[in-house]
Amino acid sequence: MTAYVSEETLDRSQMRDLQWKRLKQTINRVYSHVPFYKKAFEEQGITPEDIKSWDDVSRLPFTKKHHLRENYPFNLLAAPMEDIVRLHGSSGTSGKPTVVGYTQNDIDHWADIVARAIYMAGGRKGDVLHNAYGYGLFTGGLGLHQGAERLGCATVPISGGNTSRQITLIQDFKPRVICGTPSYILNVGETMKKMGINPRETSVEYAILGAEPWSEEMRTTIEELFDIKAMDIYGLSEVMGPGVAMECKECQDGLHIAEDHFYVEVIDPDTLKPVPEGEDGEIVFTSLTKEALPIIRYRTGDISSITRETCKCGRTTTKMSRIKGRIDDMIILRGVNVFPSEIERCIMQMKEIGTNYQIHLTKKGVMDHAQLQVEVSDSFFESLPEKNFENPTCKDLIKKIQSTLKTEALVSMEVCLKQPEELPRSEGKAKRIVDRRSSDSLSVSS
Ligand SMILES: [Zn+2]
């Protein structure tokens, strides 16, 4: 293994020293340039001089998504507007997006970080890279794009959607690397099969997948479908965009954090105290090199754990586990916490089951009610004599799904089988949860 940059193989004390120098610069920058942070420091009773050692980091204030919304559009920027060269945002459910800005140095760092990530996943200079992430305010498309160009890949900015055109270009341009959300790339592969094209015979060797939580079982499905290796990429616009962490192709077990640019903590989301290494908690990032939007202790809402054991690829950077779920997506059913990715893990082990599912949440009286709608596989559906689900085979399958969910995810759910392709297909981020609990409770009048 040769890492793309030497920072990936620093020993821990060298990395700590580099991080400390950059952390101090970041703290000084936000304190002197961003009124929001000056006030937040004052509320904590601290100034930058009080942060003397790593133990003092816990005295720094947290930043949450609502802080970005409250400072819409530009009040968190720590660089003058004439130095900003790019604005991105994430769409908010309540209208206004959260806005993030970048200086040219930020863009250069981001490109370097993503180039490093693509290299880690097997991409090399000279490869054709098919980028099916959405382009636009969302950081996925342009984030991957500039990193791919930086690495020297022939970058195809196809964006999401228009699946048949994607397939034509994959056949004609012969990409070695493909990027997108796992649910969408799966959709592309399944569509290929329906068109009589064998996805295993395409030129693709590596996939870089992210922007939504996915499971190991989903990875296996995609890898077998295309005969490729699929690696997980992580990032979020508030921290930078894709590339904050990336899985190496050598072990495909946890994502290397670009620690020379981001300091990671894992906290208990309730007590806000750090959790021990290896235990699940909320991932928190502090940027170390950003100029336009330096961010202090950003609470990502993503649940993961970290390890500092040296990876077999030779990189020494801290690794985070694949995201187990978002705190916001966590369903609480009769006191049991469950993430959609755990349900995915349970059902995708089964041969009878396809790859698409949705969880519908409603109220029955005061109780939350969950219905899992899941497509059966093509071969299972073809084997049904009447092509419907009114038979003992299907009733047995429903029982099998329910008992697996009960033993492995500890949840009870109604299960509703669907025909292949009956549920909506992903054109970008998959919609796994349909929550009608609040609208239902409003509509109950009789
Ligand atoms: Zn590794």
Image: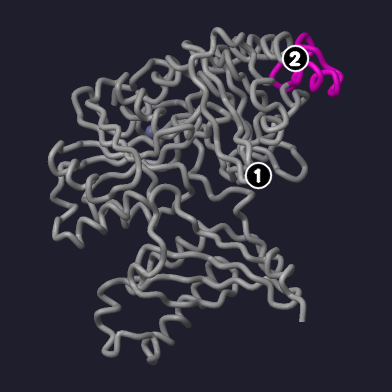
Give the color scheme: rainbow, by chain, secondary structure or one colour: one colour
Q: Position of residue 34 (x, y in %)?
A: 71, 15
How many numbered tags mark residues here? 2
Q: Which residue is mark 2?
A: 51
Q: Which residue is mark 1?
A: 94
Quarter holding residue 29: top right
Q: Residues within 10 Å of mark 2 (few under 14, many from 20)?
A: some
In this view of the protein, which residue sits in the foreground, 1 or 375? Answer: 375
For image coordinates 13% across by 50% down, the residue present is 201
Predominant SS along the magenta part: helix
Nearer the camera: disc 2 or disc 1: 1
Which stretch appears magenta? Answer: 35-56
| Mark 1 residue element | loop
Quarter holding residue 412: bottom right
Relative to 291, residue 285 above or below = below
Horizontal side of 186 relative to 93 (left or right) equals left
Quarter holding residue 41: top right
Q: Position of residue 215 (x, y in %)?
A: 44, 54
Distance from label 2 to label 1 (Cα)? 36 Å
Relative to 388, residue 146 above or below = above
